[in-house]
Image (spheres, helix red, strand yellow):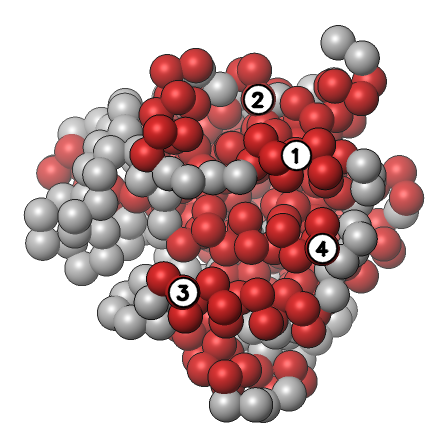
Amino acid sequence: MTPESRLVDRIAGGLYGVAYGDAMGMPGELWSRRKLLDHFGWIDEFLPGPDGHFVVDGFVAGQVTDDTQQTEVLARAIVDADGRVDADLYAQRLVEWADRIGASEGNFLGPSSARALQGIRDGKSLAETGASGDTNGAAMRIVPVGLVVSMSDGVDRLVEQVVEACRPTHYTDVAISGACLVAGAVSAGIDASSSVDIIEPALAAAAQGATIGNTVMGASVVRRAELGVDIARRNTDDNEFLQELYDVVGATVATTEAAPAALAIAVYASGDPARCARLAANLGGDTDTIGAMATGICGAFAGLGAIPADDLALLRSVNELTFDELAPQLATYR
């Protein structure tokens, strides 16, 4: 494999990794860990959304949620802005996407994104629309930034681009720090020889991101991530690991829980996308979003070839994804 084809493979792996973790985690989205285990036992394959689920009722096995769709919107916006994040263009594209699919109806969007997109429609400035967003919506769709910005260019460049992606909906120190954690892990993962090599770059990016944006209440993303990684390193039993992670770090829509949990699962899975997607799906909490972030990290590290062919085929058949087209385009900017 040439360096060029390897890069495209890693970028495609990161994009499809988001979809993989998202679709695997979709059925138990926003259920407690106890409820998830009581209902499913152990999720080991793509499943449809449960009847009566308040978000994914009617979803078919392998179907992605808004996490993947918004990731695709950001990736496309980066290509159209010649390899960088243009916050105004991205905001426009998010609103166009939401209006096209009716995302603002019902429970499809997270609270920060829903509030911000309505503000954009109302003509408010991005300084207003993203002023208070502190949930995990920015981190859940940030993978494309990590794919196009190399950590060899320095953490400043990565953080700068993450900040631009956060401006429309999540311009707070907590949300920026969480998005930087994920983007840093993705960026480092593309060039890493071991999954543990992603930890320090991710933490460094998150620490810098925590100094930017409007200050809101919240635990330290960095300290929570360090705690999650420690839990990952100490455990060898999957259920014990997931239970401790759920109990101690948390798995809600809060950035301070979801982003650190995603890094911990990626580390525990040793960068294996298939293992990662299934672990995240059985965590409980915001399983689709944590799965999207964690498996996006693992996909960037291991590449598209590490995703089982049958799972990849189902993702492609069920969803209208443009990742095969976007991956080589994004590769030209890294």
Mark 3 / mark 1, whichever is N-terminal: 3
Image position, residue 270 (x, y; %): 56, 21
In the figure, is residue 84 to the left or right of 139? right
Residue at numbered disc 2: 304
Distance, label 3 to label 4, CA atoms, is: 19 Å
Distance, label 4 to label 1, CA atoms, is: 13 Å
Residue at numbered disc 4: 80
Residue at numbered disc 1: 327
| Mark 2 or 4, closer to the camera | 4
Residue 139 seen anywhere in this rendered image of the structure: no
Does dot 1 land on a helix, a strand or a loop?
A: helix
Q: Quadrant of residue 114?
A: bottom left
Q: Residue furthest left?
A: 51
| Mark 3 or 1, closer to the camera | 3
Q: Nearer the viewer, residue 108 or 261?
A: 108
Task: Give neighbour class at mark 1: few <14, some 14-19, many 20+ (Cα, 10 Å).
Answer: many
